[in-house]
Amino acid sequence: MDEIRVLHVDDEPDFSDLTATFLEREDDRFVVETATSSADGLSALADGSFDCVISDYDMPSRTGIEFLRDVRAERPDLPFVLFTGKGSEEIASDAIRAGATDYLQKGIGTEQYELLANRIRNAVSQYRSHRAEQRLVEVAAHTDQLISVFSSDWSEVLFVSSAYERLWGRSVEALREDPTDFLSGVHPEDRRAVRDGMARLSAGEPIEIECRVNAAEDHRRWVRIHGDPIRDGSGAVARVACVGADITEEKRSRRRRERQRETLLELATDEAVVNGEFDAAIRQITETTAEVLDVDRVNVWLSETAGVTPSSTADGAALVCVDNYDRRTGDHDGGMRLRTGEHPTYVEALETNRAIAVDDAADDPRTAELADEYLDAKGIGALLDGTLRSEGDVVGMICHEHVGGPREWTDDEIEFVSDVADVVHRAVRNHERAARERELRRYETIVQSLADAVYTLDQGGNIDFVNDRYVEMKGASREELLGTPIDRLVSDSVMERTRSMYEALDRGELDVARIEYDFRTIDGEEIPSELRFTPLPGSEGSVARVGVIRDVTERKRRERELERQNERLEEFASVVSHDLRNPLHVAEGNLDLAREEYDSDRLDAAANALDRMGVLIDDLLALAREGESVDETEPIDLDEVADACWRNVDTGGAVLTVETDVTIRADESRLRQLLENLFRNCVEHGGDVAVTIGELDGSTGFFVEDDGDGIPADEREAIFESGYSTAAGGTGFGLTIAEEIADAHGWTIRATDGSAGGARFELTGVTFP
């Protein structure tokens, strides 16, 4: 028990002080204040807080009973003990009728103070208990909690609030008839814990227990009971007080939160989510959250920039539904579009909230724009949408739709949906990551299957990747090569050559650098190679290098062979030019002399034969020289060179139309020879034809065609053979020379039908600058 403040009023100060001293000795909780008159006593009561008043009866101005009546006018329940030397039954009776708590006659000896102290303790204990019960009644009238007071042995109900019937589903009358009737409303599995709590309370121990109650509700209601013992003046437990709170929703919320946490963990670690299997992951998420939140439909919408939706259209920015799950039917579909520009209020709500909880979709301004075309048509009464964000921007949402009337979303459900949106975003990111990894694996497969050796260098010039071909060429293991500085694998001279090119690459003067050098294996073997290298942009502006090494041993061998072949062709051409032209010139000179002496048709025939031999020698020389490879090319405007070649050919009444201004890479001299032969072929076989030169579809090359009779299909391969000709006086070398020139450039020439039915020659594999 707390401090007990006592006011002692007696007109004898010495006796008052003595009484105060003995009382405070009897119980150290007593704090006694004295007054020598009723007026002083009333003044002290007005100024201070007291738990009990002791008053003498016989005092000069007013009697103790008159003083009692004055006290009762202000403090009707305050304990008041009449402690007087003039004791009589009449005074005692008057005191009790006036409202005295107790009456005690003064005696001799100190035992009277022990008795007085006991009377004070009991009176104060009862007073405080009564006040506590009054407060319980007042509190009970303003709370929905259960408040009850029982005797310490649970044999009597001293107080119970009306909340008992609502919580327990049992009547107060039945409880008053049987104070333990409340146990019948407790779930059988919880009754033992409740009985244990009752015993502990009776023994003076405060308790807190949780149990299920209300059999009419199948014990689905949970209550939390706080119990405290109430002690009397002697310290013994006189009563027990209990306060019960309905924690059913708290329990439900706790169970929901536990299930939500378990669900989030399961979804976050789901194999489809982790591995980036987007369709399976989204289906798992929509089906699971529909069950957890007990909603009819769940759908996931993504921005077209998220990487898993179709590209945007002329409709403007839109959110695309990638999965719409209907829990009622178990069906999944998608493809719906939500054009953000047409729903600014809803989009603004998405951008400013992690989740949008719409309890009444028909009456919420945030979703009013969706009412006609979506909400009303689907019968949606409430929405709970979580936003997906990337670097602060909304890139999608997951929507939970309740079909029917309004629904009030709980705080834990709103938080859960926000977290689910994060899982959806993680599924999107993992899908993008998996796609990048697949693309990287595809590139790696391509790189590994290349016939060329490939390596990359980090910023420090150390090898951090080599493909299988590099390992094979070098003759060292991949483990030995990775991390090795490149300058340990190449000579100083090669490093010096590449260093200047690195600088040119860094300055942007080159896109790709090329050098030829001897690649040195681990055993010291040198392999003629071509190295192409270029910057490899990295993260945060860092730059590494990628190099491609091609074994050019075979190319070098072919180049040497071509050089020897060209030398032989040049030697052959020189022989033809000198050894055949000289006798021909002698014959032509003698023919001219013979014409001066003779006039004969036979001389004309001989002259024609000599001219024919001259043409054959020219074509033979051209054919020999056109077989040489093309070493260097340059950009050439096809329209300009075509016009120039047309002027060099005797075209008679034929006309040329140039339908292209494309630029190609070629050896100009050889290209001129090719075009002149094609133009000459058109005129020789078609006469006064219309010749057209133009670009092939897809920029793969160009064509030359006429509107003559064309080339029969069964002759289109033979026309490129040496000596094949259908024109009178033709040598049969013109198209052969054209094919040789095309081959020297790496082109392909073929004959086909022209657009007007004439001959058409198509050249493909042409390089455009």
Image (cartoon, rainbow, N blue to C red):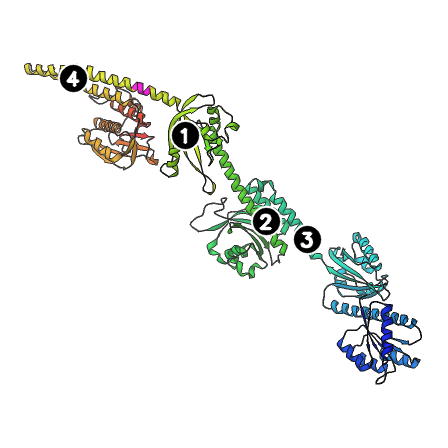
Residue 62 showing in the rendered view: yes
Nearer-N-terminus badge (2/3): 3
Q: Earlier in the sequence, mark 3 or mark 4?
A: 3
Of mark 4 and mark 1, the one earlier in the sequence is 1
Image side of residue 506 versus residue 407, left or right: left
* 3D distance between C-alphas at marks 2 and 1: 56 Å
Kind of residue sitting beneath label 3? Arg
Q: State which region is magenta.
A: 561-565
Main SS class of the magenta portion in the image? helix
Query: Disc 1 marks which amino acid?
Result: Met
Q: Position of residue 218 (x, y in %)?
A: 75, 55
Q: Is residue 269 above or below residue 129?
A: above
Q: To which residue does mark 4 refer? A: 610
Quarter of the image containing the N terminus?
Answer: bottom right
**Residue linked to disc 3:** 254
Tell me which numbered mark, 2 or 1, is placed earlier along the sequence. 2
Q: Which mark is residue 420?
A: 2
Q: Which mark is residue 595?
A: none
Q: Which residue is mark 1?
A: 495
Q: Amino acid at mark 2?
A: Val
Label 3 vs label 4: CA separation?
113 Å
Where is 87 relative to 457, above or below? below
Task: Find the distance from the CA under tag 2 to the CA under tag 3.
Answer: 18 Å
